[in-house]
Image (cartoon, helix red, strand yellow):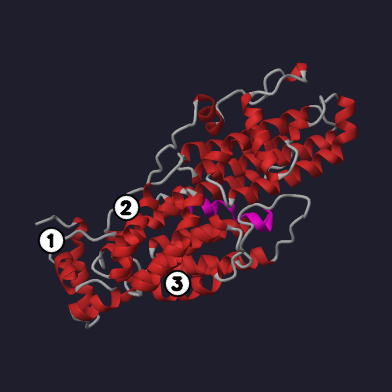
Amino acid sequence: MLKQPHMFGPELRRLRLAAGLTLTQLASSVHYSKGQLSKIETGQKRPTAEFARLCDAALDAGGALSALVPSVPTTSSTATPLDEAGADMRRGTTEPDLPGRAHWPLPPSRRQVMAVGAASVLGATPAYAAPAPTAALAANAGPYLLVTCRDLFHQYRRLGQVSPPITLLPALAEQTRALGDLAAHSEAGTRSALLNLSARYAEFTGWMAQEAGDDEAALSWTKRAVGLAEEAGDRDLASYALTRRALISYYRGDAAETISLASTARSPRLPVRIRGLAAQHEGQGHALAGDYDACLRDLDRARALLDADHPDPATPQLGATHLSDPITMITGWCLLDLGRPRQAAAVLDEACARLPVHALRTQARYGIRRALAHALSGEVDHACAIARELLPAVRAADSATIRLDLRRLARTLARFRSRPAVAELSPDLTAALHTSLG
């Protein structure tokens, strides 16, 4: 017999009886078999965090059962580098400046060739393809440089929706460095704008590193983004960096750290967008902890702040750019963490229908969670149909964070392995879980 940590089984039985429910009734509510529930109550089977959340919601336990399941932090394995230089660029450990900066023009390095190749696919000219940046030329070309580099950044973001992150990371790292190099040769106004844009590149590189499964590199690039922004006179990005760290903690399953980090960005002096994103992540942390009221309170605060945001079209926007109504989508996301899959499925059905067709990474991220919500609601065939339609997008995104929900979906469907839809989906689902360019 397995030893139940913190006496989860007896507490589940106590709460079930206090609610006046039989094993059969609770089993029907959480879509587990009566036998599985009985084994968990008697300590013969360990509960999962997913199961604890479902029971918390069904028994109105306010997260008490989730608190009895030991947290097992999710760690992302470092993506395998394409080569030694690729590893350095992903982690930002190479010299920040491009080689030979004082002696431009030089033959392009392999890194530059990779970045030029990515840009040519996008139909845009990379920043460092400009003529040798003498002080006079950089001053005259300032407005053109800014427009071109901003356009290229938006193109990279679009490419990030349809490409594995590991294929973009070398080019993004090189763009970050190239912009810093151009800034050094530019007049003051253009220099500040280029450094700010370089910071956005570094922040996006950090997100792609997290998507590639390398949290260490993600934190390193986020730190680099803060340094570039501060050099440009923008000290607000440091607070945004804490919200990025909060999101990494969320994906690791650490509710307390997620809440703690996100709550540091509440200061009224911060831009409303940063405060709104921080409130959103704080709400996600409370959902992970099973605190329904605190979660919805923070999401309401996030909605008010993000609605008050009036972004400068000349400055790339922080956070997600492919969600027309991000808080509604995140509400559905959080309802699943709160053990309310049926409510989550209803919200995610509506929100996912509004996603842009070209945003494959975003479709995969929220669509797989939608499939998981339907599976946990007992709508197994529908969940399989959703997942099958999304598998090409999942493979295109090649995302470590999306695979976390894909694993949850696979574990949930395994309880229904005798169903034809599950048996048919299983080989392709398994392949998607183990396919990675990293």
| Viewer-nearest of discs 2 and 3 | 3
Give the SS element for disc 1: loop
The picture places residue 107, in percent across and down from the top left corner, at 71, 20
Query: Which kind of residue does numbered mark 2 sit on?
Result: Ser
Q: Residues within 10 Å of mark 1 (few under 14, many from 20)?
A: some
Quadrant of the image occupied by residue 402: bottom left
Task: Specify the principal SS of the magenta part.
Answer: helix
Query: Which kind of residue does numbered mark 1 sit on?
Result: Gln
Which residue is nearer to you in this view: 388 or 48?
Answer: 388
What residue sits 88% from the left and 28% below the top? Answer: 137
Residue 344 badge: 3
Quadrant of the image occupied by residue 303: bottom right
Q: Tell me: 311 left or right of 23.
A: right
Question: Is 343 rendered above or below residue 426?
Answer: below
The picture places residue 1, in percent across and down from the top left corner, at 9, 57
Q: Earlier in the sequence, mark 1 or mark 2?
A: 1
Mark 2 lies on residue: 71
Q: In 3D space, how far apart are the residues under numbered discs 3 and 1 (Cα atoms)? A: 31 Å
Split into 4 quadrants, where in the image is the C terminus?
top left
Query: Residue 354 in magenta?
Result: no
The picture places residue 82, in percent across and down from the top left corner, at 49, 31
Which residue is nearer to you in this view: 135 or 416?
Answer: 416
Where does the magenta region start and end? 260-274
Q: Earlier in the sequence, mark 2 or mark 3?
A: 2
Q: Tell me: 275 left or right of 259.
A: right
Mark 1 lies on residue: 44
